Image: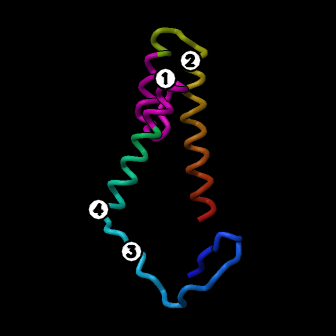
Amino acid sequence: LARIRGGGSLDVVSNKPRNTTINPLAFASIMAFLAGYSDVICLQKFHCYATMMTGNVISMSMALAERKWNDALWRLSLVGSYVIGAASVRSIE
């Protein structure tokens, strides 16, 4: 490991590997919290869901039923972007 001193120089502290494992339940809890937090921020700022495509599909369906075409098109672009992104990741894997 390395430690940066006040003057910006780098000192080697130890060459032993550290145990950096995290409890799977703690990791899942942290990730769930962050996903929910980002959803709340996105919902408040942009009026859409960042991680929940079901909410975007339902909002799109409601906009279509109410004939709010611009809102429906916006929701469709969100779902389409999600599908394209997921397909891109699958093709890279």
Q: Observer-nearest residue: 17 or 57?
A: 17
Label 2 to label 1, Cα distance in Å?
7 Å
Would you name the residue on which mark 2 appears? 71
Locate the C terminus by quadrant.
bottom right
Q: Mark 3 against mark 2, which lies toward the viewer? A: 3
Locate the N terminus by quadrant.
bottom right
Q: Observer-nearest residue: 13 or 63?
A: 13
Would you name the residue on which mark 4 appears? 25
Mark 1 falls on what kind of element?
helix
Measured as percent of width and height from the top left, residue 27 is found at 36, 61
Would you name the residue on which mark 1 appears? 60
- Residue type, numbered disc 2: Asp
- Residue type, numbered disc 4: Leu
Q: Residue at x 45, y 36 (%)?
A: 39
Question: Dividing the picture into quarters, in which one does residue 4 lie?
Answer: bottom right
Q: Which residues are magenta?
A: 39-62
- Residue type, numbered disc 3: Thr
Which label number is shown at residue 85?
none
Left or right of residue 1: residue 6: right
Label 4 to label 2, Cα distance in Å?
38 Å
Q: Earlier in the sequence, mark 3 or mark 1?
A: 3
Label 3 to label 2, Cα distance in Å?
44 Å
Label 1 to label 4, Cα distance in Å?
34 Å
Q: Mark 3 against mark 1, which lies toward the viewer? A: 3
Mark 1 nearby-residue class (10 Å; few <14, some 14–19, many ≥20): many
Q: Earlier in the sequence, mark 1 or mark 4?
A: 4
